[in-house]
Image: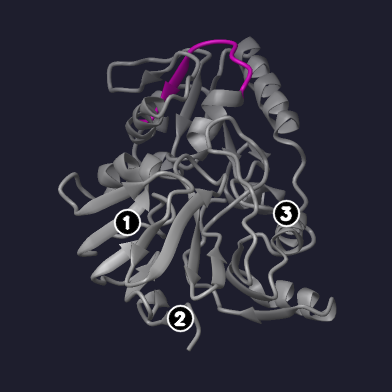
C-alpha cells in the first residue's frame, strides 16, 4: 500500500487516516495553505502551518477546529510523522513532509522559489517520492525576476499620475495583493479592496511591514492613486466610481499570448506565485526523489519530459482548481 494515494475526497494517507488538502468534507485534514482550493469548509478538524491558522480562520470561520504547527516541527498521527516546510507560495504556505517506517514523501502544495518579501522562503525537502504541482508545467513558462515587473508596474503608475488617472491592479486578495504592496515602488496613495485589507492586516500580524495603505470605502474618491482589487472587483461596482482608470492584472497567465486582451485589462504583468517550468525541474533534481507524481495543472507534459529523462514519473490529474496564478 502506498504511503499516499488519491481518493474521491483527495490525497489520503491510509496509515494515519488523514487527508492532505481534501476537496470534499472529511474528518481530519492537513492543509498546505489558506487559498480556497486547498483550504475548504466542512472538515471536522484542520491541521495547518502555524502562520496560516488566522488566515484560514478568516476564510472558513473563527470557530473551526484547527491546530497549527511551526515549520520544521514534527507531529504524529498513528505512528506517521508529519511536518510543514515553507513553500514560498503565499504567507503561511507549506510543503507537507510525510514519513512512515523510513519512507519519506513530500507534497509541495503550491510553491515557488523566488523570494518575494511576504512568503516564508522556499527550500527543497529531500524525499523518496515527490508530489509536485505543475500549474505552469509547460516549457513556455519561464519567469523573469519580479524586480523587472514591479519596476514596470511603478513606471505605469507614474505615467497614469501624469495623465490624472487612477491605477487599478487586479490581484488575488491573499498573496499576490500583499506581494504588490510590498514590492511596488511607492509614488502616491495606495488603496485596497476590503477583502485585500482583511488579508493584509493578518499578514501584518505575522511581522510583515508594508508601505502605508488605506482600505477603500464608499466615501473615498481616490485621485492618481494605486488601487488593488481582487479580480471580482471588476464586477462589484467599485470601478464605476473610480473615475478615469487604467486597469492591469498581475498573474502568471499574463505571460500567455492573447491573455491580456481576453481579461479586458490595459496591462498584464506576468508575476506568478507558482514555480515556472525550470523551477519544477529544479525541485525534482534537488529533492533526489525516485518517484514523482505531478498534479494541479498540466501533469502530462511534465510526466512525459521526466520519463524521457529516465525518471519514474506519473500523473495524478488536476486535483485542484486553477487559480489566478
Evaluate if marks 2 and 1 touch, with contact meaning CB atoms under 8 Å apart.
no
In magenta segment, residue 56: no
Q: Residues within 10 Å of mark 1 (few under 14, many from 20)?
A: some
Spatial CA distance of label 2 from label 1 is: 19 Å
State left or right for residue 276 relative to residue 166. Answer: right
State left or right for residue 145 relative to residue 129. Answer: right
Image vertical order of residue 304 relative to residue 133, above or below: below
Spatial CA distance of label 3 from label 1 is: 27 Å
Q: Earlier in the sequence, mark 2 or mark 3?
A: 2
Spatial CA distance of label 2 from label 3 is: 25 Å
Q: Earlier in the sequence, mark 3 or mark 1?
A: 1
Q: Which residue is at 72% across, 27% downward?
A: 152
Q: Which residue is mark 1?
A: 47
Name the one closer to the observer, 3 or 147.
Answer: 3
Q: Which residue is at 49% across, 19% downward?
A: 210
Q: Residue 123 location, x and y as percent?
A: 63, 48
Q: Check disc 3 and report its element: helix, strand or loop.
A: helix
Q: Check disc 1 and report its element: helix, strand or loop.
A: strand
User: What colour scheme was applied to this rendering of the protein?
Assistant: one colour
Q: Residues within 10 Å of mark 2 (few under 14, many from 20)?
A: some
Extent of the magenta region:
184-193
Image vertical order of residue 38 relative to residue 272, above or below: below
Q: Residue 288 location, x and y as percent?
A: 73, 66
Q: Residue 76 location, x and y as percent?
A: 36, 63
Q: Which residue is at 50% across, 43% downward?
A: 90
- Checking the image for residue 102, the label placed there is none
The image quarter in which residue 11 lies: bottom left
Amino acid at each position: 500500500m502506498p504511503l499516499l494515494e488519491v481518493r474521491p475526497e483527495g490525497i489520503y494517507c491510509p496509515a494515519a487516516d488523514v487527508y492532505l488538502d481534501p476537496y470534499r468534507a472529511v474528518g481530519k485534514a492537513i492543509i498546505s495553505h489558506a487559498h480556497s482550493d486547498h483550504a475548504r469548509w466542512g472538515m471536522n478538524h484542520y491541521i495547518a502551518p502555524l502562520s496560516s491558522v488566522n488566515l484560514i480562520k478568516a476564510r472558513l470561520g473563527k470557530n473551526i477546529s484547527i491546530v497549527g504547527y511551526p515549520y520544521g516541527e514534527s507531529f504524529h498521527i498513528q505512528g506517521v510523522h508529519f511536518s510543514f516546510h515553507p513553500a514560498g507560495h503565499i504567507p503561511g504556505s507549506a510543503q507537507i513532509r510525510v514519513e512512515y517506517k523510513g519512507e519519506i514523501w513530500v507534497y509541495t502544495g503550491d510553491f515557488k522559489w523566488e523570494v518575494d518579501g511576504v512568503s516564508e522562503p522556499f527550500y527543497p525537502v529531500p524525499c523518496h517520492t515527490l508530489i509536485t504541482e505543475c500549474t505552469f508545467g509547460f516549457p513556455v513558462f519561464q519567469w523573469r525576476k519580479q524586480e523587472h515587473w514591479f519596476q514596470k508596474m511603478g513606471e505605469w503608475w507614474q505615467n497614469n499620475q501624469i495623465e490624472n488617472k487612477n491605477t487599478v491592479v487586479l490581484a488575488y486578495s491573499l498573496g499576490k495583493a500583499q506581494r504588490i504592496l510590498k514590492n511596488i515602488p511607492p509614488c502616491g496613495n495606495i488603496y485596497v479592496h476590503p477583502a485585500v485589507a482583511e488579508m493584509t492586516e493578518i499578514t501584518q500580524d505575522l511581522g510583515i511591514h508594508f508601505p502605508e495603505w488605506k482600505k477603500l470605502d464608499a466615501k473615498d474618491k481616490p485621485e492618481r492613486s494605486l488601487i488593488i482589487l481582487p479580480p471580482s472587483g471588476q464586477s462589484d461596482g467599485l470601478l464605476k466610481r473610480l473615475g478615469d482608470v487604467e486597469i492591469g492584472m498581475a498573474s502568471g497567465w499574463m505571460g500567455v499570448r492573447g491573455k491580456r486582451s481576453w481579461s479586458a485589462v490595459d496591462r498584464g504583468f506576468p508575476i506568478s506565485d507558482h514555480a515556472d517550468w525550470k523551477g519544477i525541474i529544479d525541485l525534482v533534481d534537488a529533492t533526489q526523489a525516485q518517484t514523482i507524481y505531478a498534479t494541479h495543472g498540466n501533469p502530462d507534459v511534465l510526466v512525459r519530459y521526466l520519463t524521457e529523462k529516465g525518471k519514474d514519473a506519473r500523473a495524478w490529474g488536476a486535483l485542484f482548481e486553477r487559480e489566478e496564478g
